[in-house]
Structure formats: structure tokens, C-alpha cells
Image: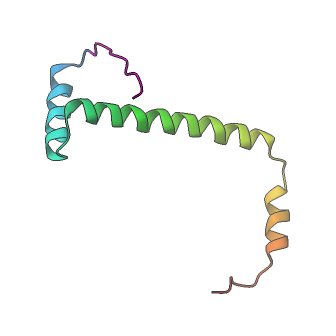
């Protein structure tokens, strides 16, 4: 089993009420809801960084060359 870190999280009461309501509606614990929310946010930020790195490596006109190779024919299938 992997280790788990504990972290004391302070949420404003109004936000905690929202979290509790949403978690209950999804039939998950508050902890599960918060873990999932943090995981989704971390993935989004990680992907944003990856896409920014890929964009920095691109060259003007690259997409035009790809589209020219693809041609005008619709895909088969």
C-alpha cells in the first residue's frame, strides 16, 4: 500500500458547506471529493505546462505542411 500524507486544510464555512453537499450528492466522502478535485486540478496544470512546451517547439507553417500531406479526401470508414 502506498503511503498517504495528512494535511490540515482550512476552508471557509460556506465553501465547506458546498463541498459537503456536492460530496453527498455524488455519494463520496468529503476526503474523496477533495482528493479528486486536487488530482483534476494538478492534471490540468501539468497538461497546460506540457502543451506550452510543445507549442514553444512548434514552427510557423508546421500545421500547413501536415494539412497538405493529409490532402482533401475524407477519411475512409
Using the image, determine if residue 58 lies above or below residue 35. below
Q: Confirm whether the magenta stretch covers residue 61.
A: no
Q: Position of residue 70 (x, y in %)?
A: 79, 74
Q: Is residue 34 left or right of residue 30?
A: right
Q: Magenta stretch: give its range.
A: 1-9
Q: For residue 15, which quarter of the picture? A: top left
Closer to us: 40 or 59: 40
Q: Position of residue 72 (x, y in %)?
A: 77, 81
Image position, residue 36 (x, y; %): 35, 37
The single residue placed furthest to the front in the displayed view is 1
Residue depicted at 19% across the width and 46% down the height = 26
Q: Does 34 sit left or right of 27 as displayed? A: right
- Magenta segment, prevailing SS (helix, strand or loop): loop
- Identify the residue shown where x is 53% and y is 34%: 45
Residue at 80% from the left image edge and 46% from the top image edge: 58
Choose top left, top right, bottom left or bottom right for residue 73.
Answer: bottom right
Q: Tally the numbered discs.
A: 0
Location of residue 40 with respect to 70 vertically, above or below? above
Is residue 5 shown in magenta? yes
Residue at 27% x, 34% y: name it: 32
Q: How is the image coloured?
A: rainbow
Question: Which quarter of the rendered picture does the C terminus lie within?
Answer: bottom right
Work out whether residue 9 or residue 69 is closer to the camera in this orientation and state it: 9
Quarter placement of the N terminus: top left
Q: Is residue 62 left or right of residue 40?
A: right
The location of residue 29, given as percent across then percent down, is 19, 35
Amino acid at each position: 500500500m502506498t503511503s498517504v500524507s495528512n494535511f490540515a486544510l482550512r476552508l471557509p464555512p460556506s465553501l465547506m458547506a458546498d463541498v459537503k453537499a456536492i460530496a453527498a450528492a455524488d455519494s463520496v466522502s468529503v476526503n474523496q471529493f477533495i482528493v479528486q478535485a486536487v488530482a483534476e486540478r494538478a492534471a490540468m496544470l501539468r497538461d497546460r505546462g506540457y502543451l506550452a512546451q510543445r507549442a514553444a517547439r512548434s514552427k510557423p507553417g508546421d500545421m500547413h505542411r501536415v494539412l497538405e500531406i493529409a490532402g482533401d479526401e475524407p477519411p475512409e470508414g
